[in-house]
Amino acid sequence: MLASIPSPSESVIELGPLTLRAYGVMIAFGVVAAVLLSQRRWAARGGNPDDISTIALWAVPAGLLGARAYHVLTDWRFDEGWAQPFKIWEGGLGIPGGIAAGVLVGLWMIRRNGWDQPTLLDAIVPGLPLAQAIGRWGNYFNQELFGGPSDLPWAVEIDPDVAASAGHRGVETFHPTFLYESLWNLGLTLFLVWVDRTGKLRRGALLAVYVVGYLVARLWLETIRVDPATEVGGVRINIWMSIIGIAIAGGWLIVWGRRPEDDSTDDIGGATDSADGA
């Protein structure tokens, strides 16, 4: 059992003359892992792995811009100065905005190139929570987005000045929400692969499963986070967005997502992927 999880003293990584922001490094690792997994799954369906790289070249920057725009629109405080929205290395990416922008641009690229949209989408979707699971560790290095005070053995230690700025002077350990979300997303990645292999969903419906799965966890995490957030009706805006997203994706899944019993459409290996396609 852990006594607590110590936070890193620095949020930068020094490699000789090169200085890297740990936040950006973790996001980059997440993107690479998602691309590799997606390439493997797409190849197992008979596709060209280079298709994934082509999509990523457009969808990843769009996702980062969408995530930052969502954060700025929902949580940026105008008294922080005009340059603050551009300081992405200090954290502040709104996942809902990143998902929306990245998926929309990815779909545009798929249609532009005439690829099999539903099958390619199913190949890519499990990589999304995998990227999030790795990228969330950037919050750990930045000592941000932690939960309320906790004395659990896996609580994370937060610098006293950072804790005081969050209104918890004298408190040393907090819920490690970055760890909770990372573990959940790893489990969600495996769950999505399993659901895809069952062959019980229409091609392309795996995206709705991901949206519901992620937002269910986000609902809970928003209730224990202590970072300042915009509220609507006394409720954090991300809770409202999670409820709306679950309702839309869940409704779509119930009405359209399940494959009819008599549907014999060839899934290009969707339900019968070997372990190589995981």
Image: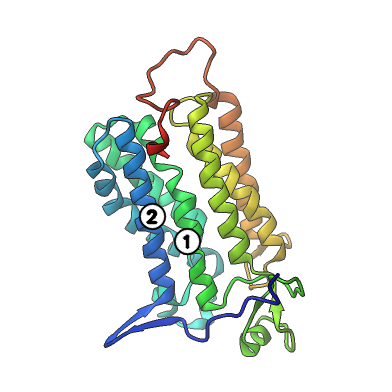
Quarter of image, res 203:
top left
Q: Residue furthest top?
A: 262
Residue where numbered disc 2 is placed:
33
Residue where numbered disc 1 is placed:
134
Three-letter code, disc 1: Ile
Q: Is residue 43 left or right of residue 152?
A: left
Q: Is residue 163 left or right of residue 16?
A: right
Q: Residue placed at 36% from the left, 44% from the top?
A: 38
> Up-down: is 13 above or below 64?
below
Q: Quadrant of the N terminus?
A: bottom right
Give 168 or 84, whichever is nearer the viewer.
Answer: 168
Three-letter code, disc 2: Ala
Q: Residue placed at 53% from the left, 82% from the top?
A: 8
Q: Residues within 10 Å of mark 2 (few under 14, many from 20)?
A: some
User: x and y percent of residue 135 in the render?
Assistant: 46, 63
> Up-down: is 118 above or below 31?
above
Quarter of image, res 13:
bottom left
Q: Residue furthest right?
A: 151
User: x and y percent of residue 154 in the render?
Assistant: 68, 70
Q: Is residue 245 visible?
A: no
